[in-house]
Amino acid sequence: MLVVQAIMRLFEVHSRRFETILQPRNAALAYFRSESTSPSVGEDHDLPVMKNSPANFEFVSACSQETADAILKDFIVIDDFLSEVEEKSLLEEAESQIARTRYEMEENWDNAIIGYRETERKNWNSDNKKVLKRVREIAFPPGVSQLVNVHILDLAKDGYIKPHVDSVRFCGDTVAGLSLLSNSVMRLVHETEKDPVIDIYLKRRSLYIMRGVSRYNFTHEILRANQSVFKGNVVERDRRISLIFRNEPDDE
Ligand SMILES: O=C(O)CCC(=O)C(=O)O
């Protein structure tokens, strides 16, 4: 019986790897594939209650109090999470790896991101490791299996990310991201109702944690430069590098 289970497990792991390899070139890292079959959102999270900044949220269209409360509970933004020195150090290491890849600029219907390059990194220098550990400790409850690689996503000044829900096959219930180099606006739109629309100001050096309702029931996107407006003010979008952390997908 144990042998059969071991073979089944091996097969599962390998078929998952193949799925990753067989993604379209543009979505090589696979996470961005949207699936309508979201698991139901759990009752509550074991995460510590974190101090959110409601000022970073703009409820662009009418939103019930219940939904607004759920978003403010499940999508956390922490401004100035990184110091300037920490940002510089992370950038140096991320750029040393990503410099070898080319920007994908193609506008195709199946491209989730336009004007970007990406890579993943597991081994960071010891200073950066300490910062990344801080992210992991705040974004994921103890004992949660996290993906060991950090996804490095470099968006050109005119690059943007289209609305999507991260694939439930490759990503668990939490996505956390550090924003380097530029401020930006992330837009959430209810996946099925297309309403409400909520804009979130992601300041350079901030950390966001997206989980629960905001991760499963809303699409998210990073607005292009000429649409980056928050509460009536233009947000200067520049080249932006994000470092993205995820946990392992659920077993079922
Ligand atoms: O660059 C970002 O912060 C957003 C990344 C994103 O959309 C994702 O990881 O699903």
Image (spheres, rainbow, N blue to C red):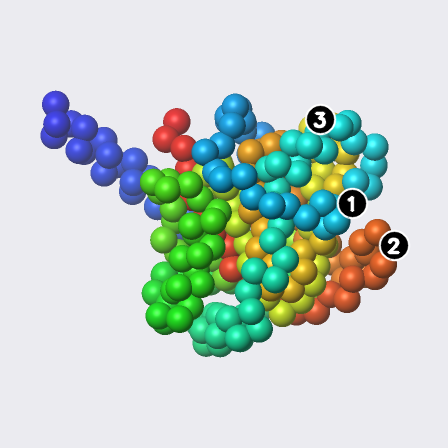
Q: Is residue 102 visible in the rendered structure shown here? A: no
Relative depth, front residue between 228 and 49: 49
x 46%, y 41%: residue: 171
Q: Quadrant of the N terminus?
A: top left
Q: Disc 3 marks which residue?
A: 66
Residue 107, how many percent across, how many down?
68, 57
The residue lying toward the viewer, choosing from 128 and 242, is 128
Please provide percent x and percent y for residue 217. 62, 32
Mark 1, residues whose alpha carbon is within 10 Å: few (<14), some, or many (≥20)?
Answer: some
Q: Residue at x 36, y 71 (%)?
A: 125
Element at badge 2?
Answer: loop
The crowd level at tag 3 (other Cα within 10 Å; few <14, some 14-19, many 20+) is: few
Q: Nearer the viewer, mark 2 or mark 3?
A: 3
Disc marking residue 73: none
Q: CA distance from mark 3 to mark 1?
A: 15 Å
At label 2, the amino acid type is: Gly
Q: Secondary structure at mark 1?
A: strand
Give the structural element (helix, strand or loop) at label 3: helix
Q: CA distance from mark 2 to mark 3?
A: 25 Å
Which residue position holds label 1? 58
- Inspect the image, locate mark 3, and give the three-letter code of the amino acid beneath it: Glu
Image quadrant assignment for residue 170: top left
In this picture, is 220 found above or below 26? above
The residue to which callout 2 is attached is 232
Rendering coords of residue 239 (x, y %) = 66, 69
